[in-house]
Image: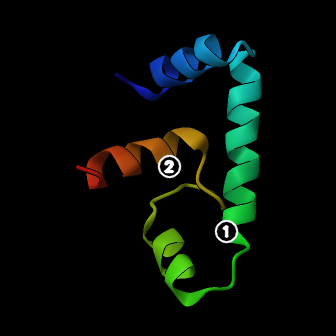
Amino acid sequence: MNSQQLFEQVSKESGVPVTEVINEIEIAIAVAMANPDPGVQKFWQAVPRKGQRPTPAELLIYLKRHIP
C-alpha cells in the first residue's frame, strides 16, 4: 500500500476528505518537530526529507521502512 492509498483508507474510515487527513498529519508533524527533547529531535533528524519538514508521504515512507 502506498501513501496515497493509506491516506484514502484513513479518509474513508474517518469520514473526512483526504486533504483533511493530510493536513492533520502536517499539523502533527509540526507539533512533534517542535518538541525540544533530544531523543525526539534525533528521530526527526533521521527522517529523510526534501524540505524543512518531511511531508506526510515522506514520513510514512520512512516509518514503513523502520517499523516492523
Label ID, residue 59: 2
**Residue at (50, 83) in percent of width and height:** 39
Pointer 1: what residue? 33
Where residue 19 sits, quadrant-wise, is top right
**Residue at (39, 25) in percent of width and height:** 2
* Depicted 44 relative to depicted 60: above or below: below
How has the structure been colored for display? rainbow
Nearer to me, 68 or 50: 68
Nearer to me, 50 or 61: 61
Q: Residue furthest bottom?
A: 38
Nearer to me, 48 or 12: 12
Helix, strand, or loop for circle 2? Answer: helix
Q: Amino acid at mark 1?
A: Met
Q: Amino acid at mark 2?
A: Leu
**The N terminus lies in quadrant:** top left
- Residue 15: x and y, percent? 71, 12
* Depicted 47 relative to depicted 61: above or below: below
Spatial CA distance of label 2 from label 1 is: 12 Å
Around disc 1, counting alpha carbons within 10 Å, would you say few (fewer than 14), some (14 to 19), or many (20 or more)? some
Total numbered labels placed on residues in the image? 2
**Residue at (52, 56) in percent of width and height:** 49
- Residue 52: x and y, percent? 67, 63
- Residue 6: x and y, percent? 48, 23
**Going from the N terminus, do you reach mark 2 or mark 1 first?**
1
Helix, strand, or loop for circle 1? Answer: helix
Around disc 2, counting alpha carbons within 10 Å, would you say few (fewer than 14), some (14 to 19), or many (20 or more)? some
